[in-house]
Amino acid sequence: MHRRNLLKGIGLAAAGCLALPNLDAATQQAQPSGTSPGPFSLPPLPYEYDALEPYIDAETMHLHHDKHHAAYVKNLNTAVAGNSELAKLSVQDLIRHLGRVPPDLRTTVRNNGGGHANHSFFWRILQKNAPDQPTGELARGIDAKFGSFANFQDQFTKAALSVFGSGWAWLSVNEKRELNIETTPNQDSPWMSGRSVLLGIDVWEHAYYLKYQNRRADYVNAFYKVISWDAVAENFRQAGKP
Ligand code: MN3
């Protein structure tokens, strides 16, 4: 039975007061939440939505992950639908080699593939009960490059506050594993320029506006309370490996 045709046939579809079960909604609910048809899927948060309270609030995490990140995934799937060559690449392969993406799809893949890659990364470098600062090789690398952890923090904060409009600030490494602080607009990233990323902060307003409104500096200071330095150190270990 095709319910939509049936309803059309009996003239009730526009009435808006039907008591029949909504088969379309039931079909959608049969899929795991966060999925959209296509090769890319929204990774679940690696912790509870309220895990980063009071620094990053649960409502922001719900919106940021379930709506914003989900939209990048959905739009990326739409963009690669019908292009089997693109659809079989990882999102990292897509954004590292944007020149291989057909010109008519390139901006869409840059923005939404970038958004998917950046946010998938971002969730994993945050944690509850985070340590104050890095240790080991990463700490020594930061001291060698920036003089001290405090100097690094100062420069990273300045970078995050300097982004005009929407974008990100990053701690990245080049092919010689040299540390560098940089910023990118929109959903661009150091990956797009062949570098590896250790740490990144999303300074789009959607990342902080509900809790911090226009006070981006307060959000950046709060971000330091939830950095998983173990994850950042692991990114440093992996950087430059084939
Ligand atoms: Mn974001």
Image: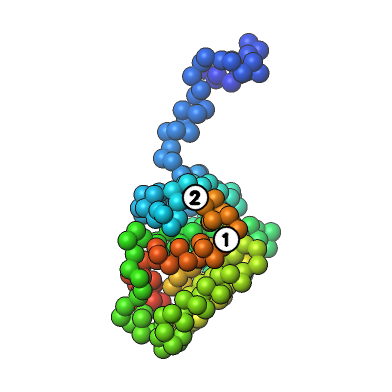
Q: Can residue 20 be seen here? A: yes
Where in the figure is residue 166, as x and y percent of width and height?
62, 62
Residue sitting farthest toward the left: 136
Residue 60 drawn at (x, y percent)? 49, 50
Rendered residue at 35%/75% (across/down): 134
Q: Residue 236 appears in which quarter of the rendering?
A: bottom left
Residue 16 position (above or below residue 154): above
Give the spatial CA distance, label 1 vs label 2: 15 Å
- Near mark 1 (Cα within 10 A), the count class, few <14, some 14-19 or many ≥20, is few
Instruction: Write the residue at 39% across / 63% down.
Output: 226
Secondary element under disc 1, as helix, strand or loop, is: loop
Q: Residue furthest top?
A: 10
Q: Amino acid at mark 2?
A: Thr
Name the residue tied to disc 1.
215
Q: Report the front residue among 23 and 152.
A: 152
What number of labels is visible?
Answer: 2
Marks 1 and 2, the one that precedes in the sequence: 2
Looking at the rendered image, the disc whose residue lies closer to the viewer, 1 or 2, is 1
Residue drawn at x 69%, y 59% as measured from the top left:
104
Q: Can residue 192 be spotted in the picture?
A: no
Q: Which residue is mark 2?
A: 60
Depth order, front residue of 84/66: 66
Q: Position of residue 52 (x, y in %)?
A: 39, 55
| Residue 117 coordinates in the image, percent (x, y) | 50, 61
Amino acid type of the residue tagged 1 in the rendering: Arg
